[in-house]
Image (spheres, rainbow, N blue to C red):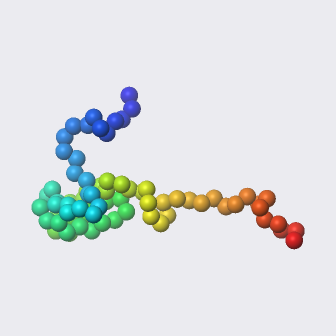
Amino acid sequence: MAFNPAIRSGFHAVYWPDTVNHCPGCGHTNWYVGRFSAECGFCATALPLVETGLMGTGSHRKSCRPYERYNWAA
């Protein structure tokens, strides 16, 4: 059976960008935001980001163009 996050139950705290996020541990709103998680500035509670790895520098790898496109003889 495949995993379906829509049918999980319970409280799942995540960090939402561009909104006021209260820490589930202490209630403060100061966060250190990284690439994959956010950490509370007061109690160091870590929350995963809602969207990780989808945007930003280094998230996509470009392959080199094929050698056929280069005209090395000219």
**Quadrant hosting residue 16:** bottom left
Left-right relation of 5 to 44? right
Left-right relation of 50 to 63? left
Left-right relation of 37 to 54? left
Q: How many marks?
A: 0
The residue depicted at 88 percent of the width and 68 percent of the height is 73
Left-right relation of 69 to 43? right
Query: Is residue 53 depicted above or below 4 in this figure?
Result: below
The residue depicted at 48 percent of the width and 60 percent of the height is 59
Residue lying farthest to the right in this orientation:
73
The residue depicted at 44 percent of the width and 60 percent of the height is 55
Residue lying farthest to the bottom in this orientation:
74
Q: Quadrant of the N terminus?
A: top left
The residue depicted at 21 percent of the width and 37 percent of the height is 9
Name the spot of residue 23 as percent of width and height, x first. Answer: 17, 60
Q: Quadrant of the C terminus?
A: bottom right
Name the spot of residue 51 as percent of width and height, x first. Answer: 36, 54
Name the spot of residue 70 as percent of width and height, x first. Answer: 78, 65
- Tell me if I can see residue 56 in this picture: yes
Name the spot of residue 8 as percent of width and height, x first. Answer: 26, 37
Residue lying farthest to the front in this orientation:
18
Residue lying farthest to the top in this orientation:
1
- Tell me if I can see residue 44 in this picture: no
**Quadrant hosting residue 56:** bottom left
